Amino acid sequence: MARKTVEPQRATIGLIAEEAGVSVPTVSKVLNGRPDVSVATRTRVEAVLARHSYRRRTRGPTRTGPPLIDLCFHELGNEWGLEIIRGVESAAAELGVGVVLTELGGKHRPEQAWLDAVLARRPIGVLLVLSSLSEAQRHQLESRSIPFVVIDTEGEPPKDVPTVGSNNWNGGLAATQHLLGLGHRRIGMISGPDDVLCSRARVDGYRSAHAEANVPYDESLVRWGNFDADMGYEHGRDLLTQPDPPTAIFAGSDVQALGVLRAARELKRRVPEDLSVVGYDNVPLTEWLGLTTIEQPLRAMSRTATQMLVALARGEEPPLRRVDLATSLVVRETTSPPTA
Amino acid sequence: MARKTVEPQRATIGLIAEEAGVSVPTVSKVLNGRPDVSVATRTRVEAVLARHSYRRRTRGPTRTGPPLIDLCFHELGNEWGLEIIRGVESAAAELGVGVVLTELGGKHRPEQAWLDAVLARRPIGVLLVLSSLSEAQRHQLESRSIPFVVIDTEGEPPKDVPTVGSNNWNGGLAATQHLLGLGHRRIGMISGPDDVLCSRARVDGYRSAHAEANVPYDESLVRWGNFDADMGYEHGRDLLTQPDPPTAIFAGSDVQALGVLRAARELKRRVPEDLSVVGYDNVPLTEWLGLTTIEQPLRAMSRTATQMLVALARGEEPPLRRVDLATSLVVRETTSPPTA
């Protein structure tokens, strides 16, 4: 089919139908995520919609009930996920919007079934947490005028994807500066997966802190994994049982630090006397554990992302499309100068 | 208006309208939770609906998108709440149902605004966590054929409210039997609010364990509060600084136990050598803390409640309307015989 150059606002459902070789009701079904369309037909229609950068004028027939936001998690981790839920829920409640919660069971990219449900549900927008959409999926949302905002990017999203994150590089820097400032010279670091942006940014901050202090760092003390307690435990045990163990460990999350603390306890290392430990996130339980950590303003990030999404849904252009909120060091009881 | 005795299935919208002195479209608006009806009119219509035990035949016009469940929390606490969310989310995903998440900001009873949103949204059912509905609110849901199930009752719900809980009395008994069995004779107990059923059941279990072992208990060692860490901390400090302190503390939740552990740490009491501590819930973090606790099968409870709700929504009668899942003792590292 020859590519027609048509102004985006001129493409009508009729034109789309003609070009795709289907009826207008069929195009409407695809737009509304109805299941009774063959995969081949749907693909063909979506391609034409994308080619014309088709934008539905409104979200579709008036939906029943107050507007909804779709909040989609890669996986509902732990306290970290709960802080985000609370931030979104509180901002949404203030704006009179409901929240539909979905989890992708560990996948970073949703499947078509999830997207179909969203298209049919017609939320005013979608919030993605540690999950991203393919180009094709983005087009599907855009053609239905359903905006989306990403919280805490897992990769490097294209420039025009509205994103709210926090300054991970600064967080890695601050934690490491704190430990170097206390006198530590062998600092273990356990980060998240190495294909996730926030992990790499924090490790870069860790490296930069060493360079800034003119202290060489040992690459073998840097470990990658996930943000869970089991990884903190395994890497913690491994780091602490080598011949020249680190005197401090900077964990990728507070929950991961739980695992590190357990490893230390089992190996009879007192914290902080024998081992300093720093976490990341500053989830509520850290106050009770007395864990030194980096505050990641998860609730503020989630509120900001929600407000940004609602503004986009109203057709407003938010002042900034990419916002990183500041992290800060919270010094408590698990760090001290190395003994001897 | 004289009370008409009409068979429930004979009451039609027309009859309701006539009796309430309004038009049929107005009754329809009230049924659909539309905001453009005066409070006086709405109240009058609801009264007539209740009087006739009116039951809408279906949930209303076909809603767009896959079916939704409304999951409503009294407040999104902490890891406890997250376990419930995960249980509901996983069961709902298997059943092809979406989950709308709401929090009442600490209130045990939702306001009309929440209920209106639900009536307009037309979920297939509502799950309530530590929140309950007034008689009038129940009628409103019933007249729209929207079933509801309660998870972990906060009070004594009427017999025909479908409920899924866990055996709190057994949980209180098991934890206390464990401590008495280790040799403890002065056991502190910090429970939840005294007007919440699960708190009282656990304390009764604690008392019964003492009676069974022929050990007198000191009522001043039983404290009431909330299930949060701050209450564990305050009561913990208080119990441990009295002249004849307990040698063990049974906390109302794992999160509360975090506060108790901190109090012990500050007062230089080693756990378990100087103080045994038992939590409640068995949330994931307890594995890393090595906390002895009572497993409350939160995810299984939530899955069961979700499946029960979907069955009710299909018009099926679940085999049981009230189910309590079993609790069990999980012995880890924070309990031992009292020293000397």
Image (cartoon, coloured by chain):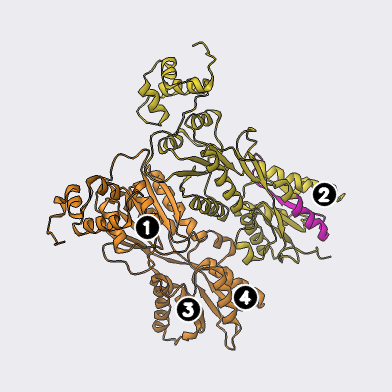
Chain colours: A yellow, B orange
Alpha carbon separation for disc pair 4 and 2:
37 Å
The outermost residue toward the top is A2
Chain letter for mark 2: A
Task: Determine which of the numbered discs, if any, sits on residue B138 in the image.
Answer: none
Badge 1: chain ID: B
Q: Could you say which disc has been placed on residue B181 in the image?
A: 3
Q: Are labels 1 and 3 assigned to the same chain?
A: yes
Image position of A142 (left or right of B198): right
Percent of width and height locating residue B285: 56, 60
Q: Nearer the viewer, mark 1 or mark 2?
A: 1
Chain ID of residue with mark 3: B
Tell me where residue B233 appears, x and y as whole percent: 58, 73
Q: CA distance from mark 4 to mark 3?
A: 22 Å
> What's under tag 4, amino acid-wise?
Ala
Where residue A116 sits: x, y (%)? 43, 34
Q: Which mark is residue B264?
A: 4
Q: Which residue is mark 2?
A: A210
Q: Vertical placement of A146 versus A228: above or below?
A: above
Identify residue type, mark 2: His
First reached walking from the N terminus: tag 1 or tag 4 = 1
- On the question of residue A102 being in view, the answer is yes
Q: Which residues are magenta?
A: A173-196
Q: Residues within 10 Å of mark 2 (few under 14, many from 20)?
A: some
Amino acid carrying mark 3 in the image: Gly
Judged from the image, the secondary structure of the residue bearing numbered disc 3 is helix
Q: In whole angstroms, how far apart are the C-alphas of marks 2 and 3?
A: 54 Å
What residue is shown at x 49% (from left), y 11% (from top)?
A1
